[in-house]
Every structure is written in C-alpha cells, then in structure tokens.
Amino acid sequence: MVYTGVLTKMQTEFLEPIQYYLVFKNDFIHVNQLLNKPIDIKLIGHQCLSCGLDRPIYRQGFCKTCFFNQPLAGDWIMRPELSTAHLGIEDRDLEFEKQVQLQPHIVYLANSSNVKVGVTRKGQVPTRWIDQGAHEAIEIVEVPNRYLAGITEVALKEHVADKTNWRTMLKNDIKDEDLLEWRQKLKQYIPEEAQPYFIENNTETHIDFPVEHYPLKPKSLNLSKTPHYSGKLVGIKGQYLIFEDNTVFNVRANEGLVVELSM
C-alpha cells in the first residue's frame, strides 16, 4: 500500500495505549496498525502549510516568507508571555490573536524526560502532553488568557525545567515523580496575578504509549539528508516514530514535507 501526502503532526486519541493517525488530504493512516511492520519513507517535495507552495520549509511547516508573516508563527506562540491581545495590541493579526490568546490556558507540569513546566490552551489537554511524550502530567493553574499563563511559566521555570530531553524521553530513561508534591512546592512562586487561579484539587494524568522496544541510542532521521529510508516500526511516542534500528523520526518537526509512505 502506498500513501502520498503532506506531513502534519499526528492526530491522537487518548486511549490505552494512545492511538495515532497520520492524516493526509484524501486519506489517513492508523499508525498503531503498522507496529512490527516495515515502512518505507521517501521525500518527494515540500508544501508550505500556509501558502501551499512548493518552497523549502523554514520552521513549523512554513516557508520563510509565511513564517515571518503568519500570526500562527508569531513570537507569542513560543513565548506566551509576549501575548498582547488582552491589551488590544496587535502583533500580526489582532482578531486572530484575540481568538487564540483570550481563552482559558493551562500551566502544567509534565514528566517526559524530567519534570518540566509548560503552557497550553485548555482545549489542548491532554493532547499537548501526548505530543511531548509525557507519561504523567498535572495542571497547576487555569487562567483566562495566554499572557497570564506565560508570566506564570516564566516565574516557575526559575525553579523547574521548561525543556524536554528528546533522547531521554525516547529511551524511556525516566522515573515517576510525585507531581502533586511538585505542584505544592512551586505554588509559592506563582505570580500574584495568577495566584487566584491555582488548582487545589486534581490528580495526575497517566499516559500509555504504544512502544514495543525503546531505542538504546536514538538517531534522528533527517529526510533532507536521507531522502529515502526503510525500517521496521517498533514504537510511537510523542510525535516520534521509533524504528528497530534505533532510528527515530519526528513527524511534527517535518511538517510541510511531501512524502511517499509504502507499507
């Protein structure tokens, strides 16, 4: 069977284990059904997720022109503390920015390679945690806009990590943590503006990924350098496909690439 399409991040279902889907324009692949089977991946082009043109992908699935013009690639996406829609101040498209920024956001703790703090829209829980490969997570604060979530994250990352080590996450070289205890320990560092939104009573969310074998020494597949790869799929974690030879492929990091997948 051969599928051709533009890569976008895998869609997920929060089941045990997580169910993964690669969605193309006219078809989709239930990736869990490919476990323990050989897959052939071939790069055949590029398609910017904004303008749709065959241009080299710069970042986040966008060509360079769109990356510096589209509101979805604004600095406030990666740095929510830079959000200004609550002040009525435009970055690139105020109406769009109001839609995204002026809605409930969650500040959370997730354990993927270590305990880290992060921010996501409320509607993206638990999808955000799944995409990061976290096996456990908990909400700390629920605030009404992205700016408050951003300043809370900035304050907390002085006391806890804000990055995931992808190699450690993929090797599953991690330990369980008491996130309730971490939440209470970090409460004192939440900014005054966000203190009323602290979540007192909730529990950890636990996530089970479909992995048969974890790689001992993960090596990342770069389709720009290796445009044709074949391997046996043995796991899916975060947005990574894990192959038997320790090769791993980050689907989200390759958004905008046009590929041919053969099974």
Image: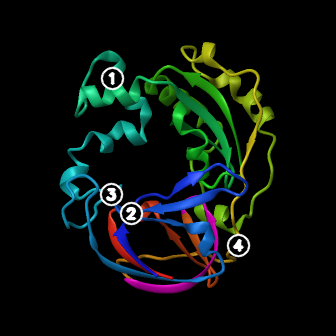
Q: Earlier in the sequence, mark 1 or mark 4?
A: 1
Of residues 177 and 9, the one nearer the viewer is 9
The x, y position of residue 96, in whole percent, is 29, 31
> How packed is label 4: few (under 14 Cα within 10 Å), some, or many (20 or more)?
many
CA separation in Å, label 4 and label 3? 28 Å
Q: Amino acid at mark 3?
A: Arg
Q: Residues within 10 Å of mark 3 (few under 14, many from 20)?
A: some
**Hey, which quadrant is residue 5 in on the image?**
bottom left
Q: Which three-letter amino acid code belongs to the residue tagged 2? A: Phe
Specify whether residue 226 is in view. Answer: no
Residue that carries the numbered disc 4 in the rendered image: 214
Identify the residue under disc 3. Answer: 59
Kindly state the secondary structure of the residue where label 2 is placed.
loop
| Residue that mark 1 sits on | 85
User: Is the Cβ of the residue at disc 1 closer than 8 Å to that at disc 4?
Assistant: no
Residue 168: within the magenta? no
Q: Tag 3 or tag 4, which sits nearer the N-term?
A: 3
- CA gap, disc 1 to disc 2? 33 Å
Q: Position of residue 230 (x, y in %)?
A: 50, 87
Task: Return the mark for residue 239.
Answer: none
